[in-house]
DNA sequence: CTGAAAGCGCTAACAG
DNA sequence: CTGTTAGCGCTTTCAG
């Protein structure tokens, strides 16, 4: 295979200088005659010249790439619909504006080993942390210490950090909406099914439910399980039912869990919502189809991604973030699984 | 903010040459004394030096990045569970081996405008085409003509292309498995619900069903709709039922469609599988939870991603692909929605 | 309107 | 064991 053509090849073929070709490639009209331009463009087409990103970045100090680090213990991190929609929004908004998205799944505690961190090759970093708050803060500090703009997804602001923007959905508010909805019926005991690894968004949802349930004197227990495995979810709930009997309300950390719960309850002869009310969370298309229709709140994960991308693009163009924090609200989706 | 440290800063601070620092950074032990090495490493830590990818790539002609172009009319392209799992597998396998994955969603016909194509900044390209075969072949030719290794996901090989590897699941075979299963009961008319935009994988599924249904003299009709919208799916099926009555079998292009179909059939007083048998496709966790449990086949989209990544890594290391084609089979998941 | 030249950060061959 | 040097492809300034 022949050598990849460079500015020099094109210049040689056309008989002009490298500088001139560069101008044509970059659409700089000033100082290039129409004739020269046409000749150069012809040569570019014939040779199949494509500008070399590295050369360009090295010179211009811009990479036109944003790095996304998703901290998750599961190699299938992307399979979660929230993440998926987030990434889609990010990717689209960036791609549309000439930027690429460099994806990096990172195991907890291994962030510092990631190429994204160890090498400088992106213009900004987008971080979706997980784990306990302490770990998350450490991750944010690490990423922020790189001297690059940082956008944190789905976690609360850390005051000490500079040049950072926090983008998340109002998970506590969404949980409060759902809890209030559930409170329309008499209720003494609620159970929430959550992942066995701590996620910031889930912390916030828990806080929202707790706030409202506490006010109404409702007891809130938890079932922790591997949320990526529907069998584990079902087993966890079954075990709880065996020990404590049926609660009045079963709160899923997300829709997938709620649906698995409904199926299990039905298989035990419990009717939803007559015997147990069930709520979901996020309402992505296809993950919220159930009978009865799920009572849940709608996430705007895609918009979250778009918002994050827009914030980054603004920061890169203007030198500073427009806002320090973006908080997107969730919308109530009244179904028939509760109250 | 102070200047980003370079090899030169570190060399200056330590009082050694740039070349020596470079060796330390790259773990080249030959020709560097332990003392020097320690001093340099200390300086690197203090300054927070991170190698500049562009400089390195420019010199070494390797980017350590693979580009993924997903051709899809929907900006939410990633939200499809198949794509999601594929990307997760790709990303993980690449990340684990020191490579990054550069994500690009591309509108049909706009591939040639993508930065991935217009600039040279990745070591290989991974392409997931959509549209009619003709368009897809054009996309493959375009990507292949770049003089870079190419991996095509989910499409049939094009013989004329060089330095290309084709990775896909055996969608026709999976469909045949399902069709044979359905044939265990008497059946005269089948309806398949498919996306209104052509996807290679769906073409292959259609071919598989057709083959078996033809052999058994079963008539196969199609309902085309916007598969990303559950309302559109439901409406499409409802319309068909109104005109033609209930078929014996309803074949979903994927599980999401099948589940939506079951809900609609139930709402019309039709029982599954007694009145209508329903089959899904792909069996991703959470998209296949339904009652009755879905009769479907299990995709290995994640493994597909891993396979593609492994093929690329091998190609980059050894100069040629190990195999021209990888075909992953699907596994029957017997449920109770059919026969 | 066009070209010569400097230099972005890095690696590797070679000289000391 | 360490340093000097050339050059990867590109943009941009400045001189012609």
Image (cartoon, coloured by chain):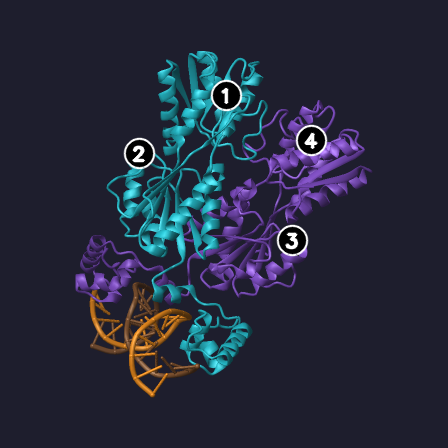
Chain colours: A cyan, B purple, C brown, D orange
Label at residue A278? 1
Q: Earlier in the sequence, mark 3 or mark 4?
A: 3
Q: Nearer the viewer, mark 3 or mark 2?
A: 2
Measure the C-alpha gap from mark 1 to mark 2.
28 Å
Question: In the figure, is residue B17 to the left or right of B118?
Answer: left
Look at the numbered discs 1 and 4 and tell me whether their residues touch, using CB distance below 8 Å. no
What residue is pinned by disc 3?
A: B156
Local packing at callout 4 (Cα closer than 10 Å; few below 14, some 14-19, many 20+) is many
Measure the C-alpha gap from mark 3 to mark 4.
28 Å
Q: Nearer the viewer, mark 1 or mark 4?
A: 1
Given the image, what chain letter belongs to the residue carrying mark 2?
Answer: A
Q: Nearer the viewer, mark 1 or mark 3?
A: 1
Q: Secondary structure at mark 2?
A: helix
Location of residue A109 (image quadrant): top left
Q: Secondary structure at mark 1?
A: strand
Q: Tell which residue pokes out farthest to the right in this image.
A: B217
């Amino acid at each position: 295979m022949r050598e990849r053509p460079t500015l020099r090849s094109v210049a040689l073929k056309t008989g002009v200088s490298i500088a001139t070709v560069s101008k044509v490639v970059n659409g700089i009209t000033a100082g290039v005659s129409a004739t020269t331009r046409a000749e150069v463009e012809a040569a570019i087409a014939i040779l199949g010249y494509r500008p070399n990103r590295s050369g360009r970045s090295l010179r211009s100090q811009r990479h036109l790439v944003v790095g996304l680090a998703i901290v998750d213990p599961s190699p299938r991190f992307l399979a979660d619909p929230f993440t998926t929609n987030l990434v889609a929004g990010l990717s689209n908004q960036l791609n549309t504006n000439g930027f690429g998205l460099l994806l990096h799944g990172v195991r907890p505690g291994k962030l510092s080993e990631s190429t994204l961190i160890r090498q400088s090759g992106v213009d900004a970093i987008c971080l979706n942390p997980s784990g306990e708050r302490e770990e998350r803060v450490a991750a944010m500090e690490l990423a922020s210490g790189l001297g690059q703009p940082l956008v944190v997804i789905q976690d609360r602001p850390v005051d000490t950090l500079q040049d950072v923007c926090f983008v998340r959905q109002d998970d506590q508010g969404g949980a409060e909406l759902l809890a209030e909805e559930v409170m329309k019926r008499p209720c003494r005991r609620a159970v929430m099914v959550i992942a066995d690894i701590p996620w910031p968004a889930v912390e916030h949802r828990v806080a929202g439910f707790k706030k409202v349930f506490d006010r109404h004197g409702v007891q809130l227990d938890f079932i922790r399980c591997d949320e990526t495995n529907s069998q584990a979810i079902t087993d966890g709930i079954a075990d709880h039912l065996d020990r404590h009997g049926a609660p009045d309300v079963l709160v899923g950390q997300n829709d997938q869990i709620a649906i698995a719960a409904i199926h299990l309850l039905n298989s035990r002869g419990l009717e939803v919502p007559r015997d147990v009310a069930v709520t979901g969370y996020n309402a992505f298309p296809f993950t919220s189809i159930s009978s009865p229709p799920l009572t849940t709140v709608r996430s705007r994960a895609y918009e979250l991604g778009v918002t994050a991308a827009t914030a980054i693009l603004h920061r890169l163009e203007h030198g500073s973030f427009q806002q320090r924090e973006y908080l997107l609200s969730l919308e109530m989706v009244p179904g028939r699984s509760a109250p």
